[in-house]
Image (spheres, rainbow, N blue to C red):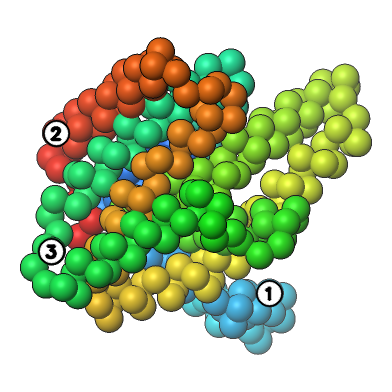
């Protein structure tokens, strides 16, 4: 009896610990600085995360669904263990919790204080490019070209020279696929991808609207109609993210296994080229004056100092 109780307590502690990991990852990915993948590396569960995500295949999902048949239950149990859902589920809940909390705050602040928010984001992005790029080698023309390709691509996307195909739900789906797959990569944040695509503020607002409408519905003061529009947007984004995890994330992981240094240089170049992206959001609200530029620079400096401080406290962020 005592041994069984001890096992139950230990299992609950493990679930809470994994949930805490999810909070850390979600917080990192909700802000355009160091990615959730880098946090996973620092906390020591990156290998388990990648193994669990890689194990999420249509074949294993179908095997689990066939578990209603007594003859297939053993195979279903094996598939469940291989997918490591006892790890992924609390991790995912923790990430969703963190993103939901941060999205509401950022959405409100972006409306009321865009200079502070996007200036701060600019500093986070710039500092993350420095701390992640310092351990990489630029010892050959191939290395320089990989970094330059990432930087050039980010600049072209941020300036709308290159745009994702489609609009509306199609764009949201593609943004979800790219952003959530980036969450498992060491170095690049999902929020950074959304800022680069010009979807960060919109999606943060839609998530906040969904949570508020669900709260109103639960209290009896809301309606299903209020839930439908933001709910549809968030659902399309999540579906895109799931597809991205099963496709784009796997492609990038193969690239990291094949040419790791060049892939990391490209990713860090992508971060460096994204530094001006938040400034476009400020320009949409305020004309660039000396006062606006100084204020933006001050907030960018604060963001950079905060990330450098986290880097020191963590003993160094490293994309490897």
Q: Residue at x 13, y 64 (%)?
A: 138
Q: From the viewer's perspective, tell me whether residue 180 is left or right of residue 121.
A: right
Image marks 2 and 3: residues in contact by CB distance under 8 Å: no
The residue to which callout 2 is attached is 312
Vertical order, 289 against 186 (above or below): above
Which of 250 and 134 lies nearest the eye of the viewer?
134
Which corner quadrant of the image does residue 320 belong to? bottom left
* Residue at the extreme top: 291
Left or right, 282 with respect to 153, comes to: right
Q: Please state the horizontal and vertical placement of residue 245, each as a whole percent of the image.
A: 52, 65
Apparent side of residue 102 relative to residue 25 in the rendered image (left or right):
right
Name the N-terminal-most of marks 2 and 3: 3
Q: On the picture, is 42 further left or further right than 234? A: left
Say which residue appears at 65% left-offset and 79% top-offset: 62
Q: Nearer the viewer, residue 101 or 190?
A: 190
Looking at the rendering, which quadrant does residue 52 occupy? Answer: bottom left
Q: Disc 2 or 1, which lies upstream in sequence?
A: 1
Disc 3 target residue:
138
Residue ID at (86%, 32%): 226
Q: Which is more N-terminal, label 3 or label 1? A: 1
């Amino acid at each position: 009896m005592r041994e069984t109780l001890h096992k139950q307590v230990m299992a609950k502690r493990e679930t809470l610990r994994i949930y805490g990991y999810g909070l850390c990852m979600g917080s990192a990915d909700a802000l355009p600085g160091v990615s959730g993948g880098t946090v996973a590396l620092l906390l020591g569960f990156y290998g388990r995360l990648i193994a669990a995500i890689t194990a999420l295949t249509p074949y294993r999902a179908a095997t689990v669904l066939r578990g209603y048949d007594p003859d297939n239950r053993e195979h279903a149990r094996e598939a469940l263990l291989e997918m490591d859902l006892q790890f992924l589920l609390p991790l995912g809940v923790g990430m969703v919790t963190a993103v939901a909390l941060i999205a509401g705050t950022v959405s409100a602040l972006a409306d009321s204080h865009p200079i502070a928010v996007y200036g701060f984001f600019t500093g986070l992005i710039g500092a993350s490019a420095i701390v992640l790029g310092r351990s990489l080698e630029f010892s050959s023309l191939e290395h320089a070209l990989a970094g330059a390709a990432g930087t050039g691509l980010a600049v072209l996307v941020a300036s709308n020279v290159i745009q994702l195909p489609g609009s509306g739900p199609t764009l949201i789906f593609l943004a979800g696929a790219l952003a959530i797959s980036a969450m498992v990569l060491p170095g690049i944040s999902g929020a950074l991808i959304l800022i680069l695509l010009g979807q960060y503020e919109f999606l943060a607002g839609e998530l906040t609207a969904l949570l508020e409408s669900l709260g109103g519905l639960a209290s009896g003061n809301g309606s299903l109609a209020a839930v439908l529009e933001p709910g549809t947007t968030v659902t399309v984004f999540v579906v895109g993210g799931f597809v991205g995890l099963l496709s784009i994330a796997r492609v990038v992981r193969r690239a990291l296994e094949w040419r790791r240094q060049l892939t990391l240089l490209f990713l860090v170049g992508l971060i460096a080229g994204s530094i001006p992206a938040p400034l476009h959001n400020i320009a949409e609200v305020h004309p660039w004056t000396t006062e606006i530029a100084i204020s933006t620079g001050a907030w960018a400096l604060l963001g950079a100092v905060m990330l450098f401080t986290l880097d020191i406290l963590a003993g160094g962020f490293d994309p490897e």
